[in-house]
């Protein structure tokens, strides 16, 4: 087979499968210290057809060369709109790799993972202070999942109050994932057009007893602060609805305005946008959700709580919407955000 | 100000260019009644040295799998990660890059994801895999949504009791407000009960979801499950929490699976208290357009050179917002890279050997424990690197006793399975030496290891 990779600095990197040389292996396994054993042959698979076979240096060169085809925050200026691209502090990466965090199994008993739980608890409190929401869940894996979680809680809250509202108002300035998240919760989407900034009148025209919530992005996708937001929230509340805010653009408000203070009921955070964790070429992110007091009981499980014995993961929450993913959240990302 | 590097001069110049008199004026669009009247009550910023001291203090309070004798599995596995993996993923051209919407500046990420998708297809025996989901549990929920979306007038989903409990809970959350009926099929003997399954299958059934290996570590007879499932016109979803097993056992795609989902953490991703991991999602050709999430495809540029792009974007939320197949947006880009490097390093032979090693270690432990008084292996049948042990001694007491000896003995199953009150799910990987296994066996028997 040919082993040319383009000449000099002109990269023409082949696929792993095209670089394969039968018999090569890039890692040496330990010798077994137990007797050999094998399952019943009827259950065994044949070799994995066309799977790569490369030496260590092949793999290192392959990915090093691929990396040079990328452009990231460390390569230069990245003036991207709705997905705040921040510098990713190097100390974050070091923190997430500390053995006490990286080598902690999620099924470890609470009393042997107090440091991790304390970190999560403090992060919950810090996010609460920044946003003005008293209750926080760190579980959602990304903004869109946080959004889905938030809308689930809104639906559960209405149901607990004996209401069957089935519509959600979404302005055209809202983030792209909003309608899909609402649809996943069985809501019908009521689009409302805005003139750059949403008006109270536009919301008043469609806000009735069928409407469970208004979903806004603030500042919106055009970068404008929704100046009537307080009045709009009051209107929605008067008519029995709740207000969801997409936190994608929270970066612009931190320390100036707190969504929880101005009438928003639920908001997700994007730790990879606002709190300097890497975008990673499309994730992993983390999408914690903050809610007002009356929605606390509906947060997904588990929630990190503190009592006289220390920190623990609380699963005993009968009104919870349930879990939205495995384990307690993207802990490795939470460590970076905390750092 | 370390992360806000602008000097007063920089700020003044920027304000001048955009014609705004002061920084405060930039915020004039925010009405008074929306402003905070006092500063945030956050602790003062710390220097890097101070910060790391705090973090090390927190990290040291946790039980690390490298310091303890850990036999914990249950959806997160302790495998060795070669140094090459972290070395390569630390290249900031990868981790500081954005989602690859602009292919001309993202070919590195896109090709790596394309290769990841291909390797997932090879491992699972399927035709098409997407660019990743959040984790195994949410991928499983999305598989159920796919079956509900595409199975006309079918709204029933049968979940094996031996499917990972967190996967079942996540499916329930995702289906909470959809027109869907979830039914759990018992697994009294450690595997999905075929007779009950057959009786439950009908013309309303959209999907049957089973673990492979299942939560008890057992290798389900997928072919036997696929047959009645397909006869009823439903899809079989195989959920793989420990994908290393696929290097040894037959691929689900070969055994009739219509959708294969799972968790890829085993392939080089740190345990990190349960996240981030990576969900994978693979289907047969006919379901390609119904798949959630992103997909990287191969194409040629204007000069005829090969290139890679995000494709089939009409399924995403940007275009037909209300009709999107899923709301998933950011996924697990960096984790696809980790998995790709891990798999490329091990390769065809290494991955098989690693799987054989896991099998042999677990088989040894299983055999040793089977010989102890007061313990029995709960189920017959084939397992990979996990198995269930019943104990005469209450499990909580047993776990505490072993903790005193530095052993994390396994997961107590009683919380999720009341009928398994004194049962323990024990996981043995290549990271557990024979000495560790022998210490576990001695300690279980009541001795000092």
Image: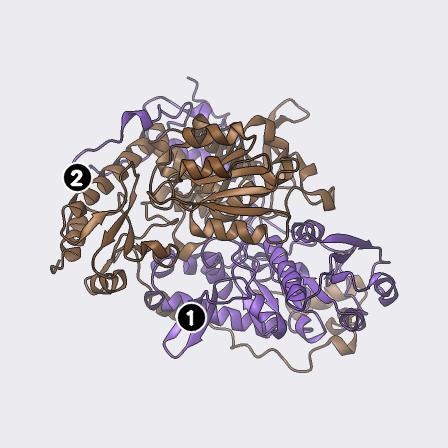
Quadrant occupied by the N terminus of chain B: bottom right
Question: How many numbered marks are there?
Answer: 2
Task: Pinpoint the chain carrying mark 2.
Answer: A
Chain in purple in the render: A
Q: Is residue A100 left or right of residue B257?
A: left
The image quarter containing residue A140 is: bottom right
Q: Position of residue B67 (x, y in %)?
A: 25, 58
Q: Position of residue B323 (x, y in %)?
A: 72, 43
Which residue is denoted by mark 1 in the rendering? A118
Which residue is denoted by mark 2 in the rendering? A34
Q: Position of residue B429 (x, y in %)?
A: 28, 44
Any mark on residue B106, and which? Answer: none
User: Is residue A132 something that shows in the picture?
Assistant: no
Q: Is residue A261 above or below residue B397?
A: below
Say which label, 1 or 2, has the lower sequence index: 2
Chain in brown in the render: B
Work out whether residue B380 or residue A147 is closer to the camera in this orientation and state it.
B380
* Distance of label 1 from label 2 (alpha carbons): 40 Å
Label 2 residue SS: loop
């Amino acid at each position: 087979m040919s082993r040319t990779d383009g000449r000099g600095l002109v990269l023409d990197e082949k696929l792993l499968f095209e670089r394969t040389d039968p018999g090569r292996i890039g890692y040496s396994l330990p010798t077994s210290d137990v007797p050999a054993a094998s399952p019943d042959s009827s259950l065994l698979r044949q070799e994995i057809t066309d799977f790569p076979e490369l030496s260590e240096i092949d793999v290192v060169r392959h990915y090093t060369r691929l990396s040079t085809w990328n452009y990231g925050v460390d390569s230069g200026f990245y003036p991207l709109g709705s997905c705040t691209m921040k510098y990713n502090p190097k100390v974050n990466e070091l923190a997430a790799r500390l053995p006490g965090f990286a080598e902690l199994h999620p099924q470890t008993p609470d009393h042997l993972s107090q440091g991790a739980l304390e970190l999560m608890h403090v992060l919950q409190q810090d996010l609460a202070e920044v946003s003005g929401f008293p209750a926080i869940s760190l579980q959602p894996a990304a903004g869109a999942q946080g959004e889905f979680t938030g809308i689930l809680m809104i639906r559960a809250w209405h149901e607990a109050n004996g209401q069957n509202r089935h519509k959600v108002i979404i302005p055209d300035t809202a983030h792209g994932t909003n309608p899909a998240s609402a649809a996943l919760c069985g809501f019908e989407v009521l689009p409302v057009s805005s003139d750059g900034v949403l008006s109270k009148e536009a919301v008043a025209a469609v806000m009735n007893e069928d409407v469970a919530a208004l979903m806004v992005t603030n500042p919106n996708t055009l970068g404008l602060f929704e100046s009537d937001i307080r009045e709009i929230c009051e209107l929605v509340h008067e008519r029995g609805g709740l207000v969801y805010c997409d936190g994608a653009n929270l970066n612009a408000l931190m320390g100036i305005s707190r969504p929880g203070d101005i009438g928003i009921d639920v908001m997700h955070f994007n730790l990879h946008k606002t709190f300097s964790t890497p975008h990673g070429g499309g994730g992993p992110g983390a999408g914690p959700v903050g809610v007002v007091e009356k929605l606390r009981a509906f947060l997904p499980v588990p929630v990190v709580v503190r009592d006289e014995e220390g920190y623990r993961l609380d699963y005993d929450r009968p009104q919870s919407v349930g879990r939205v993913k495995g384990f307690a959240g993207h802990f490795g990302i939470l460590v970076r955000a905390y750092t | 100000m370390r992360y806000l590097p602008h000097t007063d001069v920089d700020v003044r110049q920027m304000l001048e260019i955009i014609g705004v008199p002061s920084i405060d004026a930039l915020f004039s669009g925010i009405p008074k009644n929306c402003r905070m009247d006092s500063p945030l009550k956050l602790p003062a910023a710390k220097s890097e040295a101070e910060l790391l001291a705090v973090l090390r203090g927190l990290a040291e309070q946790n039980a690390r799998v490298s310091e303890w004798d850990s036999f914990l599995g249950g959806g997160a596995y302790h495998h060795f990660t070669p140094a090459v993996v972290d070395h390569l993923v630390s290249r900031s051209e990868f981790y500081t890059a954005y989602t690859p919407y602009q292919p001309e500046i993202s070919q590195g990420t896109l090709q790596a994801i394309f290769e990841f998708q291909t390797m997932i297809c090879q491992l699972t025996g399927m035709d098409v895999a997407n660019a990743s989901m959040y984790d195994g549990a949410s991928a499983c929920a999305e598989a159920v949504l796919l079956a509900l979306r595409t199975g006309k007038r079918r709204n029933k989903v049968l979940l094996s009791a031996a499917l990972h409990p967190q996967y079942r809970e996540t499916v329930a959350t995702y289906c909470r407000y959809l027109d869907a009926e979830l039914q759990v099929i018992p697994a009294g003997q450690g595997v999905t009960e075929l007779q009950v399954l057959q009786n439950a299958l009908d013309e309303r059934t959209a999907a049957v979801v089973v673990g492979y290996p299942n939560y008890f570590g057992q290798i389900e007879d997928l072919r036997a499950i696929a047959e009645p499932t397909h006869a009823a016109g439903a899809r079989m979803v195989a959920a793989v929490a420990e994908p290393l097993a696929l290097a040894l056992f037959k691929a689900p795609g070969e055994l009739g699976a219509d959708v294969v989902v799972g968790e890829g953490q085993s392939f080089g991703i740190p345990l990190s208290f349960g996240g981030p991991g990576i969900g994978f999602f693979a289907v047969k050709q006919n379901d390609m357009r119904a798949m959630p999430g992103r997909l990287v495809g191969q194409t040629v540029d204007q000069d005829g050179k090969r290139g890679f792009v995000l494709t089939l974007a009409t399924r995403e939320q940007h275009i037909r917002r209300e009709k999107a197949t899923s709301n998933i947006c950011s996924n697990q880009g960096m984790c696809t890279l980790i998995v790709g490097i891990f798999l490329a390093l091990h390769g065809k032979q290494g991955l098989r050997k690693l799987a054989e090693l896991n099998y042999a270690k677990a088989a040894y432990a299983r055999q040793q424990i089977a010989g102890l008084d007061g313990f029995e292996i709960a189920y017959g049948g084939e397992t990979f690197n996990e198995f269930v042990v019943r104990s005469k001694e209450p499990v909580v007491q047993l776990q505490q006793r072993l903790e005193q000896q530095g052993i994390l003995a396994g997961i107590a199953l009683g919380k999720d399975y009341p009928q398994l009150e004194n049962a323990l799910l024990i996981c043995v990987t290549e990271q557990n030496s024979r000495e560790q296994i022998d210490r576990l066996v001695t300690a279980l028997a009541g001795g000092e290891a």
